[in-house]
């Protein structure tokens, strides 16, 4: 028996008990005649004491030779500590060791296994197994496990069946590039790894499974932004015989359950917002509604003077920054520089100070009088003491720029409290999105999403105006999930493919199996998927997902620990009928 107890459970109630513990040496303190060792495992830390007077000299010598991260087993008696440590559950006791066995030695770890470590991100990723011994990572993984368990509990109770779908499949269009796997047995042919189990879960509905879920890996070969992973996990769900309302209710219930069980937060009905309103009021389809600072559109109150910049703009839009009138000229100049950074891309920023005496002072006083500026304040909801920041230009661009400014200012003002949870359904997304570069429309969600009833005809005349039965769940400014009611008849699906630029042959080659299935009594169905990594991170009060993933990849998609991706040898290439064509 390696252990009778773990390192986190012994307290004063165990005094005089004989115990056996196993774990890692966190650190030791050596006073010559007495040595203390902190023994650590997943559950906590227990102090061991080796005392020349009470045990043996030999044991002390053994203890003195222990290094950090040695794996040891000890036998001993639980005794009361002379100086107690109120910060840990085992702080009232220590183990007077009578026997010590080294189970395995350790070389000196490349960084300290402490909550605040001296190891940088790269080195911690290379030695991730050591990183996982640290509380912040360990606790994040335990937290993730709890969230997954609660997802399973809730959905199983609601009658969902967990079904696994294959990983070696054919392309699913979720808007990213596929990772592909060469087939040895079918030379020259490739599987694609699923960007999501989308088509399979729809086929499960045709198969009568009715309520499906899966906690599943998805693979998307995208350029990695800071907080993206090429493989990530979804809570993937689909239901048959449902309308949008049914789906929103079930998954609002799931999210409420998680917030309650995991965070102890109870939230009543989630608000809903139309996509068009989200864009108009927040410039963003995933607005953070923990704070206000809603956009005020200023075209009508600005475009009648001699100020060409505003007159020529498609949209003039502003926000009120609470207390912003206290900013110095220099601070405002810095803010202007901030919006002009290439990442944001604004050409400039106009502002108006709302003075305490009810007057205004703007950077365009030459063009706008006090009455004009009072209207700016009214439209943006600015009060005395606030600062109105105004951007102008192309509608879509300027909305994105002001949204970035709104989030940045809220961050600086401490309005994005990770302990506050503000979920929001954004509904009625457009069906199609115009790709500015190619001039083609593509599916905003995916090609299986159904248009709103009665809007199919609009596809021919005003494709950009067609709205979809598509919805996203947003939490604290992050999209944590999205889905749609699907097309479930062959004709509509064929029309949709046509509008997305697929020829009949292409549609058949790629999605013939789905269209075929739709001929055999496909029920009305719909679903959604939550991004588990992000959901867990947000519930855990963090915005980066990496610590909640046991073995994440870095920003270039590499696993630096196992050193993947890697070359394969020539024999393997030959077996796969592949030849490399590298430039260098
Ligand atoms: N497959 C979709 C996605 O990954 C989710 C859904 O429509 O259910 O975003």
Image: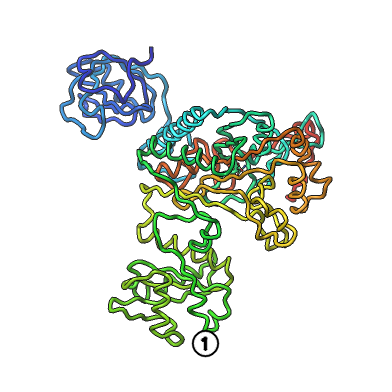
Q: How is the image coloured?
A: rainbow
Is 403 placed left or right of 87 in the picture? right
| Depth check, front residue: 427 or 575 | 427
Drawn side of residue 491 relative to residue 449, left or right = right
Res 126 seen here:
no
Residue at 54% across, 66% down: 342
Which x, y percent locates residue 348?
50, 75
Residue sitting at 22 percent across and 27 percent down?
A: 32
Q: Nearer the viewer, residue 90 or 376?
A: 376
Ligand 1, image quadrant it occupies: top right
Q: Left of 44 or right of it: where is 111? A: right
Dot 1, crowdedness within 10 Å: few (<14), some or many (≥20)?
A: few
Closer to the camera in the image, 129 or 37: 129
Quarter occupied by the N terminus: top left
Residue 514 left/right relative to 269: right
Q: Is residue 182 above or below residue 444?
A: above
């Amino acid at each position: 028996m390696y252990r009778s107890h773990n390192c986190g459970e012994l307290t004063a109630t165990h005094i005089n008990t004989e115990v056996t513990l196993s774990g890692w040496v966190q650190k030791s303190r050596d006073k010559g005649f007495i040595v203390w060792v902190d023994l650590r495992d997943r559950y906590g830390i227990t102090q061991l004491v080796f005392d020349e007077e009470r045990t043996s000299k030999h044991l002390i010598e053994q203890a003195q030779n222990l290094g950090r991260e040695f794996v040891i087993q000890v036998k001993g008696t639980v005794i009361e500590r002379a100086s107690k440590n109120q910060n840990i559950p085992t702080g009232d006791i220590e183990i007077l060791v009578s026997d010590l066995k080294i189970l395995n030695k350790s070389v000196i770890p490349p960084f300290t296994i402490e909550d605040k470590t001296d190891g940088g991100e790269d080195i911690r990723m290379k030695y991730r197994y050591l990183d996982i011994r640290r509380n912040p990572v360990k606790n994040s993984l335990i937290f993730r496990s709890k969230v997954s368990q609660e997802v399973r509990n809730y959905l199983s109770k609601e009658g969902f069946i967990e079904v696994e779908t294959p990983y070696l499949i054919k392309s699913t269009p979720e808007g990213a590039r596929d990772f592909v796997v060469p087939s040895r047995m079918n030379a020259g042919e490739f599987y694609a790894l699923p960007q999501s189990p989308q088509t399979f879960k729809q086929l499960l509905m045709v198969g009568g499974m009715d309520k499906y879920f899966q906690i599943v890996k998805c693979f998307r070969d995208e350029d990695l932004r800071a907080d993206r992973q090429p493989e990530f996990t979804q809570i993937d769900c689909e239901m048959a015989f449902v309308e949008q309302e049914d789906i929103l209710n079930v998954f609002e219930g799931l999210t409420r359950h998680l917030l309650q069980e995991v965070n102890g937060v109870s939230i009543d009905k989630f608000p809903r917002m139309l996509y068009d309103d989200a864009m108009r009021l927040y410039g963003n389809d995933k607005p953070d509604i923990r704070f206000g600072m809603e956009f005020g559109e200023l075209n009508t109150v600005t475009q009648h003077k001699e100020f060409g910049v505003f007159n020529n703009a498609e949209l003039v839009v502003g926000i009120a920054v609470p207390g912003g009138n206290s900013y110095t000229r220099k601070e405002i100049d810095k803010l202007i520089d901030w919006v002009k950074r290439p990442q944001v891309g604004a050409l400039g920023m106009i502002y108006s100070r709302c003075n305490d005496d009810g007057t205004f002072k703007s950077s365009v006083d030459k063009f706008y009088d006090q009455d004009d500026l009072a209207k700016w304040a009214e439209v943006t909801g600015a009060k005395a003491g606030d600062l109105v920041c105004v951007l102008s230009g192309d509608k879509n661009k300027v909305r994105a720029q002001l949204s970035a400014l709104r989030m940045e200012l809220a961050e600086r003002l401490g309005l994005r409290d990770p302990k506050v949870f503000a979920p929001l359904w954004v509904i009625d997304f457009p069906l199609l999105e115009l790709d500015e570069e190619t001039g083609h429309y593509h599916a905003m969600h995916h090609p299986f999403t159904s248009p709103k009833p009665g809007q199919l005809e609009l596809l021919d005349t005003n494709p950009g105006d067609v709205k979809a039965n598509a919805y996203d769940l947003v939490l604290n400014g992050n999209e944590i999930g999205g889905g749609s009611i699907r097309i479930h008849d062959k004709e509509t699906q064929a029309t949709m493919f046509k509008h997305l630029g697929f020829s009949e042959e292409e549609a058949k080659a790629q999605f013939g199996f789905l269209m075929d299935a739709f001929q055999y009594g496909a029920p009305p169905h719909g679903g959604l998927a939550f991004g588990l990594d992000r959901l867990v991170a947000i519930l855990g009060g963090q915005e980066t997902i990496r610590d909640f993933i046991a073995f994440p990849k870095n920003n270039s998609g590499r696993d630096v620990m196992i050193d993947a991706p890697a070359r394969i040898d020539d024999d393997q290439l030959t077996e796969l009928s592949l030849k490399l064509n590298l430039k260098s």
